[in-house]
Image (spheres, rainbow, N blue to C red):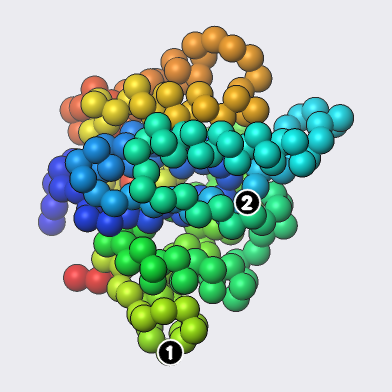
Amino acid sequence: MSAPLMTETPERVLAVYAHPDDPDISCGGTLARWAGAGSAVQLVICTVGDKGTSDPTADPDQLVAARVDEAKRSAEVLGLGGLHLLGHLDGDIENDRSLRAELVRIIREVRPEAIVCPDPTAVFFGEHHYNHRDHRVVGWAALDAAAPAAASPLYFRDRGPAHQVAAAYLTGSLEPNIWVDVESTIERKIEAVACHRTQLSDAGDWISAALREGAEHAGVEVGAKYAESFRRIWLAT
Ligand SMILES: [Zn+2]
């Protein structure tokens, strides 16, 4: 039984998320911490974020171009070693064989010790919010791709040699069981989220305050000033 505050750093990490701003908001402090500690951290963004606006006159092509640029800049801020943009459309993504094949190929190339992805079982958050379908779809697809598919040599035989991921770290979970201290990287998380200008309705410090508040709330659980929480599932022992 390990302590709920995680101090070790996985050697190689693959984060898998739906939209360009999801990883920064969900676990940007942890990804920056691990990258800063020498971990090779790569990121998969499954969609292009083409519907991420409330403006009916917005040009989707322009929005996509801006969001790709934002994703690249935020990956630099977090110190990531690789960014894989799969290019699916918002709302159209499915946990089907095609998506799992794409993810298995990347997992077998990157060969991560840990994957990080949304908790697909987290649906209802209080009385005012439920989880976006793309987050749920990508969470299940990432888990299904990691195990058994990527770990089993007879799955997707044309997508590289099998690789066993040791653990999955699920974000946005209603059942967290492990926390990472992000006091040293909370500023970079805020900076990374701020790269996504298309997703911020106005200037100001509200997003910074909201991110600090969320990290403070998570930190209370483990006596840290700022933390991010995960549901860790061991895929191999
Ligand atoms: Zn999202």
Mark before the other along the chain sequence, 1 or 2: 2
Choose between 139 and 66: the one closer to the eye.
Answer: 66
Q: Which mark, residue 206?
A: none
Q: Residue at x 24, y 26 (%)?
A: 184
In the picture of the structure, the residue carrying the numbered disc 1 is 154
Do tag 1 and tag 2 residues touch (Cβ < 8 Å)?
Answer: no
Residue 197 versus residue 32 in the image, above or below: above
Whole-angstrom CA distance, mark 1 to mark 2, is 28 Å
The extreme top residue here reads: 204
Residue 18 versus residue 68 in the image, above or below: below
Tell me: 61 left or right of 128. right
Residue neighbourhood size for the residue with mark 1, other residues' Cα within 10 Å, grouped as few (<14), some (14–19), many (≥20): few
Tell me: 35 left or right of 64. left
Q: Amino acid at mark 2?
A: Thr
The extreme right residue here reads: 57
Under circle 2, the secondary element is: strand
Q: Residue at x 27, y 62 (%)?
A: 113
In the picture of the structure, the residue carrying the numbered disc 2 is 47
